[in-house]
């Protein structure tokens, strides 16, 4: 266990258990020393030793579940296929590629907070770092992919049967794998819309697709589970986290990050000109080119933006109802006193487990403290009055935004953590402040969708195989899924 991954970093940490997502059948044996050696069986049944020692079995990212026990607390599994060292090795051997850096909004906020500079300056620092030391040509934000996902998700949900409630987002790969491996009976509840990481990666490959042009897409994402997603597709070549980026900087003796920051702070740069300069030729150029922010929570605002699209159609106001903790929220679109649409937000595996139980038939009730907020104009959802306690049942929502990390993506396991003497809550609050520094995105959805369709993305945003899985029909069942969670 290294400083990159630690049980102490997880506030709903699940102790590693004997159950693995790819369990090995165990049989009772006498306590004897066994030779780990390959054997050959002759046609007559005689057993002979081959003399070859067997290699140690390995588990790949596609085999594992992000349960916080065997993946998010195990560096050996996580970095086997995606790590900054893998990127460095590839870069040293392949200087003829066109390199592209793609960033999530949460990562930009985390790095900005850690280095105590505003987000736009941090963007310039990152490009300066990767262009000068690793010859990167381009840098993009995955928010373009998020905007495209909003539209696809709205159409998907509205086109479903009215009685088909509780469509759950497939943006978080840890959550998706959890359902695939342990609750296959609710797979039909998962949205078919792919993640911003995938959508943006696909656009990068398509826009830069030229004769014999080789493209390498390095993504910096807020949690280690995004490596799981990338391991199942070919549009993102490597995923690292902000923590790994810090380790990469510290290990590379060429890099003086303080000097880079000082240079950027002393430079006068027009940010609009900057983001167009670093975009690939043919990239979407309207507004902030995807570098702005959208309304909603810091996990992407999928629930909020779904209701905002419904609001454009039906009118009304958006009301926020708080659940029993900060990681459970219901949003309602109320038109003339009638609730026309509902959207939920749920974070953390403990809360997710309770939702799954309800979906599978356990309708046990629990009293929850609620708080109503009214959305004023187009400025988002704001709180203004307390109301009596009432039940929040997210299974009645049209869509539920699900994220495995407690606190959502801004608190992802790969984000830069507070020091030993600091407060995690205060640190997360500072990250959220940085996240909100970004101006509201001014992109025209119609122009963005037209541009993405020109690059063939209409056939890739929504897939019957969903966000990360390409092998759902042959998923292996766990012998006893409850073993993974017996320590809760």
Image (cartoon, rainbow, N blue to C red):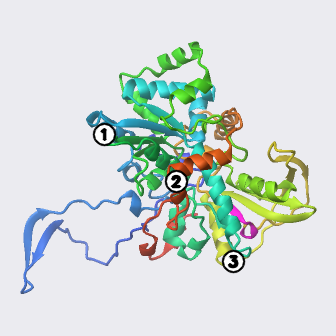
Please name the residue that numbered disc 3 is placed on: 362
Q: Name the residue at 67% across, 79% down.
A: 361
Q: Residue furthest bottom?
A: 44
Residue 366 appears left or right of 140: right
Give whichever of 368, 79 is nearer the camera: 79
396 is within the stretch colored magenta:
yes
Q: Residues within 10 Å of mark 2 (few under 14, many from 20)?
A: some
Q: Secondary structure at mark 1?
A: helix
Please name the residue that numbered disc 2 is placed on: 457
**Distance from the alpha carbon under mark 2 to that under mark 3:** 40 Å
**Distance from the alpha carbon under mark 2 to that under mark 1:** 28 Å
Q: Residues within 10 Å of mark 3 (few under 14, many from 20)?
A: few
Q: Quick one: label 2 or label 3, which is nearer the N terminus? A: 3
Residue bounds of the magenta highlight? 395-401
Indicate the position of residue 371 as horizontal and vertical percent values: 85, 54
Indicate the position of residue 62 as horizontal and vertical percent values: 40, 61
- Residue 471's disc is none
Q: Name the residue at 50% across, 49% down.
A: 455
Residue 301 appears left or right of 192: right
Q: Name the residue at 62% across, 66% down.
A: 353
Q: Quick one: label 1 or label 3, which is nearer the N terminus? A: 1
Please name the residue that numbered disc 1 is placed on: 90
Q: Is residue 71 visible?
A: yes
Q: Is residue 196 visible?
A: no
Q: Secondary structure at mark 3?
A: loop
To which quarter of the image does residue 470 belong? bottom left
Residue 58 appears left or right of 482: left
Give whichever of 112, 2 is nearer the camera: 112
Residue 468, relative to residue 84: is it above or below?
below
Q: Name the residue at 44% across, 58% down.
A: 70
Indicate the position of residue 76 as horizontal and vertical percent values: 37, 50
């Amino acid at each position: 266990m290294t400083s990159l991954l630690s049980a102490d970093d997880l506030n709903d940490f699940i102790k590693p258990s004997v159950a693995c997502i790819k369990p090995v059948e165990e049989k009772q044996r006498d306590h004897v020393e066994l030779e780990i050696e390959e054997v050959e069986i002759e046609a007559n049944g005689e057993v002979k030793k081959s003399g070859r020692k067997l290699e140690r079995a390995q588990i790949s990212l596609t085999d594992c579940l992000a349960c916080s026990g065997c993946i998010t607390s195990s560096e050996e599994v996580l970095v086997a296929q995606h790590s900054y060292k893998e990127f460095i090795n590839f870069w040293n051997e392949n200087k003829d590629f066109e390199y592209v850096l793609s960033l999530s909004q949460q990562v930009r906020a985390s790095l900005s907070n850690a280095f105590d500079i505003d987000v736009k300056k941090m963007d310039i620092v990152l490009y300066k770092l990767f262009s000068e030391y690793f010859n990167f040509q381009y840098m993009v934000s995955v928010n373009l992919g998020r905007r495209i996902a909003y539209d696809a998700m709205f159409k998907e949900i509205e086109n479903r049967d009215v009685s088909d409630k509780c469509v759950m987002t497939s943006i978080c790969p840890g959550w998706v794998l959890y359902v695939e491996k342990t609750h296959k009976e609710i797979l039909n509840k998962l949205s078919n819309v792919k993640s911003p990481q995938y959508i943006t990666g696909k656009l990068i490959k398509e826009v830069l697709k030229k004769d014999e042009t080789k493209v390498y897409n390095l993504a910096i994402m807020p949690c280690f589970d995004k490596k799981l997603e990338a391991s199942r597709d070919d549009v993102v070549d490597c995923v690292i986290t902000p923590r790994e980026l810090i380790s990469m900087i510290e290990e590379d003796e060429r890099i003086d990050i303080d000097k880079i920051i000082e240079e950027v702070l002393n430079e006068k740069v027009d940010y609009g000109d900057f983001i167009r300069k670093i975009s690939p030729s043919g990239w979407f150029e309207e507004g902030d080119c995807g570098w702005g922010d959208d309304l909603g929570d810091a996990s992407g605002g999928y629930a909020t933006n779904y209701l905002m699209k419904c609001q454009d159609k039906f009118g009304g106001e958006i009301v926020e109802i708080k659940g029993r903790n900060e990681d459970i929220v219901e949003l309602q679109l109320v038109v003339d006193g009638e609730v026309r649409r509902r959207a939920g937000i749920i974070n953390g595996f403990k809360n997710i487990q309770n939702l799954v139980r309800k979906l599978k038939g356990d309708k046990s009730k629990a009293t929850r403290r609620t708080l109503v907020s009214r959305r004023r104009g187009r400025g988002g959802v704001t709180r203004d009055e307390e109301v009596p306690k009432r039940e929040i049942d997210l299974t009645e929502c049209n869509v539920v935004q699900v994220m495995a990390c407690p606190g959502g993506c801004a608190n992802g396991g790969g984000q830069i953590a507070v020091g030993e003497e600091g407060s995690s809550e205060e640190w997360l609050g500072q990250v959220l402040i940085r996240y909100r520094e970004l101006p509201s995105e001014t992109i025209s959805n119609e122009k963005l969708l037209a541009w993405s369709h020109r690059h063939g993305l209409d056939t890739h945003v929504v897939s019957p195989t969903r966000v990360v899985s390409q092998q759902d029909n042959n998923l292996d069942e766990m012998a006893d899924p409850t073993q993974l969670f017996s320590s809760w």
